[in-house]
Amino acid sequence: MTLLCDFGFAGQLTMLSPERVVQLIKKSLSWETWEQTCLWQLITAHGVPLSSILPVLPDLDYSKHSEALTPIMLMLKQER
């Protein structure tokens, strides 16, 4: 598992850039359940906007990708 890290000038740590999160999610679809769960906890904790995640939806299959679909559905439920 590779996390993309960037230290900003203000001393902030960016672990998941919005530009690369879709690529990382697509790659994670072949990971084991535990690794995907950890990734989604990082995505949620990092506050990645739902708009950055939506492009991955066409690639998801409900019978194969429940680890990704569950947190996305929770994010959609919380959207206003």
Image (cartoon, helix red, strand yellow):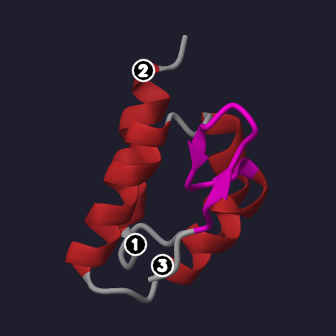
Residue at the spot 70% in from the left edge and 37% down from the top edge: 51
Distance Cα–Cα, label 1 vs label 3? 10 Å
Crowd class of label 2 (few under 14; some 14 to 19; many from 20; radius 10 Å): few
- Mostly what secondary structure, the magenta segment? loop
Above/below status of 63 relative to 31: above
Range covered by the magenta-colored residues: 4-18
Estimate the x, y position of residue 30 in percent, counting from the top left.
44, 89
- Left or right of 62 on screen, residue 38: left
Above/below status of 69 relative to 35: above
Quadrant assignment for the C terminus: top right
Per the image, label 1 sits on a secondary structure element best described as: loop
Residue position marked by numbered label 2 in the rendering? 78
Identify the disc placed on residue 28: 3
Identify the disc placed on residue 65: 1
Q: Assess whether residue 6 is covered by the magenta stretch.
A: yes
- Left or right of 12 on screen, residue 69: left
Above/below status of 74 relative to 77: below
